[in-house]
Image (cartoon, rainbow, N blue to C red):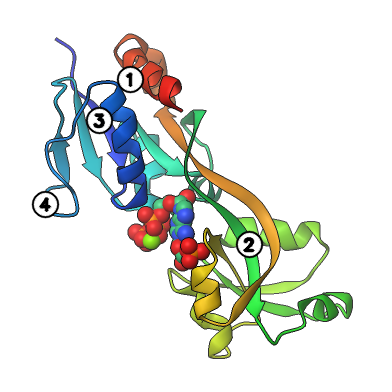
Amino acid sequence: MSEILTLALSKGRIFEETMPMLAKAGITVADDPEKSRKLILGTSNPKLRVIIVRASDVPTYIQYGAADFGVAGYDVLAEHGMDGLYAPIDLGIAQCRMSVAVRDDFDYLSAVRQGARLKVVTKYVQQAREHFANKGMHVDLIKLYGSMELGPLVGLADAIVDLVSTGNTLKANRLKEVEVIKEISSRLVINQAAYKRRRAELQPFLDAFAQTA
Ligand code: PRT
Ligand code: MG
């Protein structure tokens, strides 16, 4: 008998938007991660279990084979790198964009034109570095783990690189979006070795995701 397959998900929007895709394949998850403290959740399919991890840790669990597959935002994947991973299906869920934003009274275009050296706070250091390097801009990047929106308000930075969906968070903090770096959605991510060795067991689940995506 083969071992159970493990699907890595983060709670919140990715879990919520993945559930209807599993439901279409007739699979329901035994517990609600918002209510239960369990980190390993059974499903209605005895061949599949779900683990709940931080969004930015999803690629790590899959890379090392602790999960066979999972769902992660392209923001997280691009920052982590694709070593040992295969991400064939864009699920089109958890859509947003990665953008540069500044205080609504800050003249970003003039600063750029004058070649000012901007301080930028972000959780996405690799992608921010690449973006500004492509523009030929010199920036000082400061890594934060959350609430990037605060940076320009308290003098930590001139700009932020963060995800935007409705724009409400920017607005509530008197920030404005000045550049869209990339559009983001979530992908199905598979451990490369599992994809080779356990293809037959994985295939029905991959088909289910491919059909609903
Ligand atoms: O919360 P935690 O630190 O554990 O991790 P996380 O914030 O990365 O996880 P989670 O569950 O919030 O996000 C998981 C994935 O959802 C991300 O990796 C993105 O691919 C995707 N996603 C889609 C988003 C958003 N939309 C989004 N709006 N992730 C975060 N946000 C945040 C954004 O950072 C900003 O603070 O929501 C705020 C802006 O939202 P609006 O609607 O006010 O513009
Ligand atoms: Mg979050």
- State left or right for residue 18 relative to residue 189: left
Q: Is residue 154 above or below residue 115?
A: below
Determine which of the numbered discs, if any, sits on residue 205 in the image: 1
Q: Quadrant of residue 58?
A: top left
User: What numbered label is drawn on residue 6?
Assistant: 3
Label 4 neighbour load within 10 Å: few <14, some 14-19, many 20+: few
User: Of the residues under marks 4 and 1, which one precedes in the sequence?
Assistant: 4
Q: Which mark is residue 117?
A: none
Whether residue 3 is visible here, answered yes or no, is yes
Query: Where's the N terminus, which quadrant?
Result: top left
Which one is nearer the viewer's eye here, 99 or 104?
104
Res. 36 mark: 4
Q: Is mark 1 within 8 Å of ligand 1?
A: no
Residue 50, image x, y percentages: 22, 36
Q: Are marks 4 and 2 in contact (CB under 8 Å)?
A: no
C-alpha gap between disc 4 and disc 1? 25 Å
The structure residue drawn at horizontal position 33% and vertical position 14%, both measured from the top left corner, is 204
Task: Name which quarter of the figure residue 146 lies in.
Answer: bottom left
